[in-house]
Amino acid sequence: LDHGTGAKLSRELVERIAEALGDVYIGQMEDSALLDVGAGRIAVTTDSFVVTPLFFGSGDIGKVSVCGTVNDLAVSGARPLYLTLGLILEAGFPMKSLLRILASIRAAALEANVKIVAGDTKVVRQGEADQIFINTTGVGVLERSPLRAQAVRPGNKIIISGNIGNHSIHLLSVREGLGFERRVESDCAPLNGMIDMLLKSLPEGTISCMRDVTRGGLCAVLHEFARASGHTLQFHKERVPVTPEAVMAADMLGIELIHLANEGCLCLFVDEAHAEQVLGLLREHPYGRNAAIIGEVTATPEPRVYMVAPDGTRTMLEELYGAELPRLC
Amino acid sequence: MRETRRYRINGIVQGVGFRPCVHRLARQFGAGGWVLNDSDGVLLEVQGPGAALDAFMDELVTHPPPMARILRVLRVPASEPEVHYEGFEIKHSVDLQRTETIVPPDSNVCEDCLREMKNPEDRRHRYPFINCTNCGPRYSIIYDMPYDRPQSTMRAFRMCGPCEREYHDIEDRRYHAQPNACPDCGPRLEARDRDGQRIDTPDVVRFAIARLREGAIFAVKSLGGFHLVVDAANEAAVRELRRRKRRDAKPFAIMVADRESARRVAEVSHYDEQILESPQRPIVLLRKRPGVLSDAIAPRNPNLGIMLPSTPLHYLLLEDPGLQTLVMTSGNMSGHPICYDNESALTQLRGVVDYFVLHDRDIRTRVDDSLVRPTQAEGLGQPMLCFVRRSRGYAPYPIHLPEPVGSIVALGAELKTTVALSKKSEVFVGQHIGDLKNDSTFEAHTDCAKHMQQLLSIRPDVVACDMHPAFRSSRAAVERKELRVVRVQHHHAHMASCMAENGLTGKVIGAIFDGSGYGLDGTIWGGEFLYGDYREFTRVGHLRPLYLLGGDKAVREPIRVAISLLTETFGEEAHRLELPALADLEAFNREVFFKMAAKKINATPTTSMGRLFDGVSSLLRICHQCEYEAQAAIELEALLDRDFQMLPPLAYSLEAQEDRLVVDYRPLIRELVEELRGGATPDVKRLSRRFHSTVVDIIGQMCGRLAERHGTRTVVLSGGVFMNEYVLVNALRRLKELGLEPHCHRQLPTNDGGISLGQIMVAHAQSASAELPSSQETP
Ligand SMILES: [Fe+3]
Ligand SMILES: [Mg+2]
Ligand SMILES: [Zn+2]
Ligand SMILES: [Zn+2]
């Protein structure tokens, strides 16, 4: 790539991008996109994506860039409609790779039923960026009242929609050639379809709140909700959905699955009476087949997270303290 | 010529029959006067001929009551004008609120009580809670000081007439014996099945003996907590206990009735006997006689942990000639603190035991069994006692310092934690608490710190803790906003602890070897040579770093350390080495570990000497996976069979790096690998001995050079690695041969159980030389 400077080259690049995105790109190449979002409230979120490696078994940085933003909108209760796409390319980044990434952006946008309405592309000198950075901003409409972490209350059941930790392990394994990548796949997926299905099938208020489990893993999500709700959250270690392969890999690597990132996994806080129903609905959906009720919010007015072992002993979980240092003497 | 003298006596002098003893001696030597308890201890005035008074004091100091510990005897001015005493009396105690006396540790049942217990005519015949002023529970049942019945868990029992009379009779052995009780008014035993249902039996002890003889597993409430008990002679029962406790390897302690029975199962020297029979009744590591008891009790270990009975109940359980040896292991699930109340025992241990022996005397403070190892070796002079765990019988007895350090609380490290509190020149070191990662252990730790402050009426103004940012004790310290926090480097604390125990004050060389500790540079240290004093230190040498593949996981799986050692030594070639140890791993796992080692994926660098032992243990195929802490190193040492003979060391090199000496282990690994690939079956016993000899040689070489460079001859050895008897004994000998003055721990464990004392010393030295930050000056 040497398309950062010359006006013509630059325009050509943008055109190639628009072409690759095809019908999901409805930008007009003007200064701003004008959108019709109806009369309701809108939700906006933005995220920048830096992924190593760029391409992995079940996806790439393009797919992650769409799913991450779509999922952030969807968990707030919004219906994602539009994305913007910002690309920062390192000079010399192969066009073939770019086209491959754009193809998967397109595929993910199609699946998530969102349009890309504006874009920006910068090419920087070698060393100023690492191959490619992507930023997406998403806009969605709120057709119901938004889901807020403060709504989480004692008695809520905690549901996880899929196996945890796989995305991180998959990526690490591809990056370092550890050999787990064929056994542990990334779960990267747009979840708005599944979330929409849930919210449509359930009376309002059944789901107190939800979050996509990304960086920091399940542990970070639970701590966020413990703080926001001011209550104690506890979950049962053996009920957390995991694949034996991920458990083995985490064990060998000496890392904890509850601290690892996903890209297609939800953590839901659900009214107790409807927990089984929610679980049933999730399990019928392809992205929720391994869903499980893992714990509950207890009335203790202390922002704590406890993990209960199969023998009944509770351990208070700490938020990860940077990289975990060995403590054993 | 009649004289009047007044003495003040400090130490453990209250609640241990001190005043009656003074009273008895005074009359024996024909002295008049009085004795009383006050907030400083005991104050007494004696009147009589000078020679008689000399003899009186001599006798008192050399033969105080068994549970008493005299710290200081001070002659103070006598009353004026001089009065003439007709006799000797015990005066009323004065001002006991601001107590300066020391809480007595728990003690074993005394001979007098035992005699009564065995006497069918005695009203306490076979009574499992018999005690007197000279024996019985103390620290474990005390809520608060001054030590009085209503301040102990005995407040739940009201003394009957006869007990009350004994309690008030100065001539009686039970004069002011706070836990005094009898079958009519005191605590009672109770048997339950595993579901917690009461078992109706006229004699709980006989019921227990009968079931134990059939191979049943019991939980028995002892003095400081529950024990899991089986007949040690019943191999199937021992194995069943291992299965239910999910514990394959960690040695179990046993209890035998007396020294003769101990001699049947182990080698017992005269010195060992003294330790076995001491009132603290620790578990004593003694060389086992092979083939007497099942190997399942202490697998792959030359020692047996043996203790003699400490409570009357223990004696009763051993009264049947058909049941002579009991396995007595701590009543907990792995990783959890020992149960000490009936309810939690009934819930936590129901999956492990068939029956419970409970009683209704509550335990206020959980106190584990103490574990010690006596060592006798040529060239060391006196026999040495090494504490592995200092708890029941010893805690919270203080360590005496040559100089006062003020009031500081120290919170220890993360594993084997103890709390220490200082007051003037005494440091009170609390009972073993354990691994703080566990919530219930952490609660015990917090409680211990509070309880000790209350018992000893110490209000600390400084809190000392470890530098590790993630240690729970350290974070708790930071939350104590009212206290000034001093974070002490882990190995500096080890060094200072050993210095303090030995009364050292100048600059020393410290050879500090352990598993891990947070270093000044944020990495994990553990094979360190320090130079310094209480206030400061310089890191003057260390082991070349190795890598923990998967962090803490590598501590439990030494094979990971072995792979790191091989990778550091052989680079790219490492994974092509054909070693039996590597063949023990599945190919896939081996590849992953080698990649982690080569690319440093989740691989934490450490200079830990403990890990070097682990890695070598795994290379020799002694232990690839640890079920309990330091298992790999313990089993590697076990191959030496407690024989201290040295062999030529393996190769290693010392490299000057910046201003430090770095011990390069790579030549050692290279030599080991060559031996292991030699074709013939490797002689692992010999290789273990050569490795151990190498570590001794490293200590000698390093300390020799460092001592010369820094112009000091004093060396302290500390850290968990010095639990290794062979290394300790030979390092002491070697350093002496080199003309140096080596010191090791004698009163506290050399592992992290001894850290809290060192933290106090460092915190004192550092706060004495630094101004309080202004933000801390608000009241
Ligand atoms: Fe240590
Ligand atoms: Mg985001
Ligand atoms: Zn007694
Ligand atoms: Zn009585």
Image: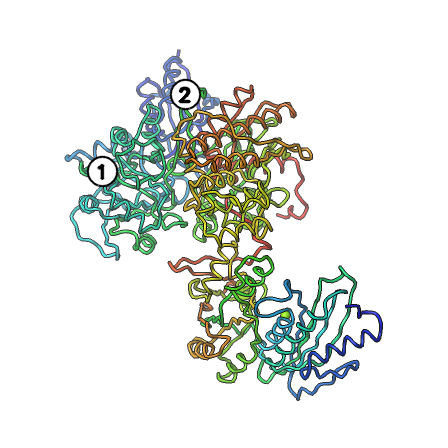
Q: Residue at x 41, y 32 (%)?
A: B685
Q: Chain of mark 1?
A: B
- The foreground one among B109 and B12 is B109
Q: Amino acid at mark 2?
A: Val
**Residue B707, placed above or below residue B675:** above
Q: Position of residue B693 (x, y in %)?
A: 49, 28
Say what secondary structure mark 1 lies in.
loop
Q: Nearer the viewer, residue B345 or B714?
A: B714
Viewer-proximal residue, B561 or B609? Answer: B561
Give left or right: position of B46 versus B535: left
Q: Does residue B337 lie above or below B752 as drawn?
A: below
How dense is the environment of label 2, judged by Cα within 10 Å: few (below 14), some, or many (20 and up)?
few
Q: Chain of mark 2?
A: B
Snapshot quadrant of residue A177: bottom right
Q: Amino acid at mark 1?
A: Leu
Query: What label does residue B318 carry, if any?
Result: 1
Does the image show residue B271? yes
Whether disc 2's CB lies below 8 Å from ligand 3 is answered no
Give me the residue at 15% from left, 35% from top.
B120
* N-term mark: 2 or 1: 2
Figure quadrant of residue B262: top left
Disc sitting over residue B83 in the figure: 2
Please rate how many residues cluster around mark 1, counting C-alpha atoms within 10 Å: few if below 14, some from 14 to 19, many from 20: many
2 and 1 marks on the same chain = yes
Residue B204 image offset from top left, x and y in percent: 20, 46
